[in-house]
Image (tube, coloured by chain):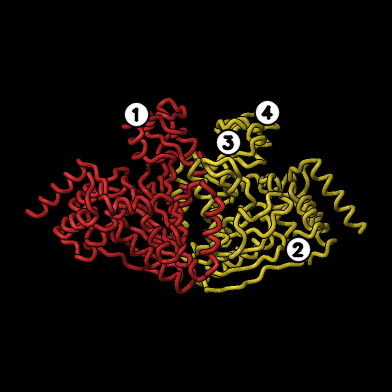
Chain colours: A red, B yellow
Amino acid sequence: MRIPFENIASTLTRILSARGMPAQQAQLCARLFAETDRDGVYTHGVNRFPRFVRMIDAGGIDIHAAPTPSVRLPSLERWNGHRGPGNLNAWACMDRAIEIAREHGIGCVALSNTTHWMRGGTYGWQAADAGMIGVCWTNTLPNLPPWGDTDPRLGNNPLVIAVPRESGHVVLDMAMSQFSYGSLAAYRQRGEMLPVDGGFDVDGNLTRDPGAIERSQRPLPVGYWKGSGLSLVLDMIAAMMAGGLATNQIPQDPEREIGICQMFLALNAAAFPAAAEIAKSVIASLGSTRYPGERVLRVREENLTLGIPVDDATWDEILRIAELSKAT
Amino acid sequence: MRIPFENIASTLTRILSARGMPAQQAQLCARLFAETDRDGVYTHGVNRFPRFVRMIDAGGIDIHAAPTPSVRLPSLERWNGHRGPGNLNAWACMDRAIEIAREHGIGCVALSNTTHWMRGGTYGWQAADAGMIGVCWTNTLPNLPPWGDTDPRLGNNPLVIAVPRESGHVVLDMAMSQFSYGSLAAYRQRGEMLPVDGGFDVDGNLTRDPGAIERSQRPLPVGYWKGSGLSLVLDMIAAMMAGGLATNQIPQDPEREIGICQMFLALNAAAFPAAAEIAKSVIASLGSTRYPGERVLRVREENLTLGIPVDDATWDEILRIAELSKAT
């Protein structure tokens, strides 16, 4: 079904407020969930809200926590997320990186002890909307075998790189596995094979069969040995600079994926007026080739006009949670 | 044949000095070429020196130029490379990024108007040797079709990420194509197929045949659409922040690949004593899985002891250039 944006945002806000989350935080947290679906990223938005609430109710996510700085160097800062809501922590840290970049040209915040940020692209759009180049990444629970290995020793550590552009930002939001588990499930449910090899089957052969990869739990790092190496260094940098947990120390259960580390960088592209012209001409040189983030503005407009497509079962579950929240 | 490190370095220094390059610059430039082969990266070292000399003699590379800053923000600086030797420009800019990071936690230098930096990993090792996390990348001439396209509108824009570690740095040095043209040629000469798909043949089919990809000039972006997007944003950021040419503006002839842009970032990991412990434990968690840069220290020791393997024809050509340089 299609639900109006404001309906989603207010429903999620009520659920969070009922749990005692301060009003302003509840509104922002709900808005970031709803905006993810508004932008067409249905794998990382309201579909994850029920798990988010379970993690709050189980005490894993602390809705009263707010991130605090522990070191200022001064263009690079270290913050502690105190196990607060991952999207609010990430939003606050990118905001701070932007603030530093306005003053110093570049700003970096390394965040420890946080929780899942949901859609990484959110913080890329946030930076680009402020005229900044934004770069951020997160480590994750171990869910990706390194190239040449069968055990999930690496995380899929999504990397976001956003470039501001007047007629639509370029926002790359890529996990270090060629296909996410969500994407594998979607292909399987549609009865489709993957367009390219996506992992190994249980016998160790490369395969395009999404179900075979779900069974083996051996998705392929993007670019084989290259994505494997990239995932490793992203994890190391986040943990080292934030002073927190590395992927190998994070529990493999998604509902206990707590204490992760993230990096937020902003570069003040707005300080260079000619930069906008360069962004424009590079995209023009692509001709009809699509660029990352291209379809977002179109989908956003459509979803704001027609309502946001939400899976029936998910919306029913959210309404049930809202009803129960009212009762308590 | 195997040539002692000092012999290579002094021979290249003589050739550069004979052309009027100042002594200190000639020594560093020659050393960076020789160290590349010393570390086993035979595709980006002395084998490229003859072309480098041709580009100096043709006036494309200006051996009297030194990079200069044009903007200080202050943690992010913009420098102009004035078409100077690419490895010296890159070395100077990473050096400056390290200096800024020592003072501000993070430092960034965006360099325009430079020339090929040869081995990107050089500047990663440079940062890591200084206790810094180093990140750098370059744009290049158009040599990579975007995913879904057949024309080379993107560069293979190598990205380097280096993490300092006491018993051997972790240094990722990855081009945005799954295999470089140098690597394709090496597979073909050995009569081997690639271990995974490396590009398209002239009929547009994915193939492991290196010769077929050389003929089609359609290597595959690392991770298909993902590397295609990553290559694009790296080019945009470098050109926008440095205020220089983007890939689509760079001539497609390697001997005229002049005026490119590069980014150099350093993060002061040494400011956090616990970071070294985290680096150690992450690598330990990999077990027997190899990490990027692992074999460098072993190869380096072997090559310093036994001499550095240099292709006979390449060394003959360099000796011939040295002989001619003496005469002029």
Identified by mark 4, the residue type is Gly
Badge 3 crowding class, 10 Å Cα cut-off, few under 14, some 14 to 19, many 20 or more, is many
Q: Which of marks 3 and 4 precedes in the sequence?
A: 4
Q: Secondary structure at mark 4?
A: loop
Which image quadrant is residue A156 in? top left
Q: Secondary structure at mark 2?
A: loop
Give the residue at mark 3.
B199
Give the residue at mark 1.
A191
Q: Nearer the viewer, mark 1 or mark 2?
A: 1
Report x, y in % for residue A80.
Answer: 33, 63
Which image quadrant is residue B216 in? top right
Cα separation between marks 1 and 4: 39 Å
Indicate the quadrant containing the N terminus of chain B: top left, top right, bottom left or bottom right.
Answer: top right
Chain bearing tag 3 is: B
Identified by mark 2, the residue type is Asp
* Residue at x 34%, y 60% (from the top left corner): A90
Label 1–label 2 contact, CB within 8 A: no
Give the residue at mark 4.
B191
Report x, y in % for residue B139.
Answer: 60, 54
Chain bearing tag 4 is: B
Identified by mark 1, the residue type is Gly
Label 3–label 1 contact, CB within 8 A: no
Indicate the quadrant containing the C terminus of chain B: top left, top right, bottom left or bottom right.
Answer: bottom right
Q: Which numbered tag is attached to residue A206?
A: none
Which image quadrant is residue B26 in? bottom right
* Residue at x 60%, y 57% (from the top left corner): B246
Q: Which numbered tag is attached to residue B62?
A: 2
Co-location on one chain, circles 4 and 3: yes
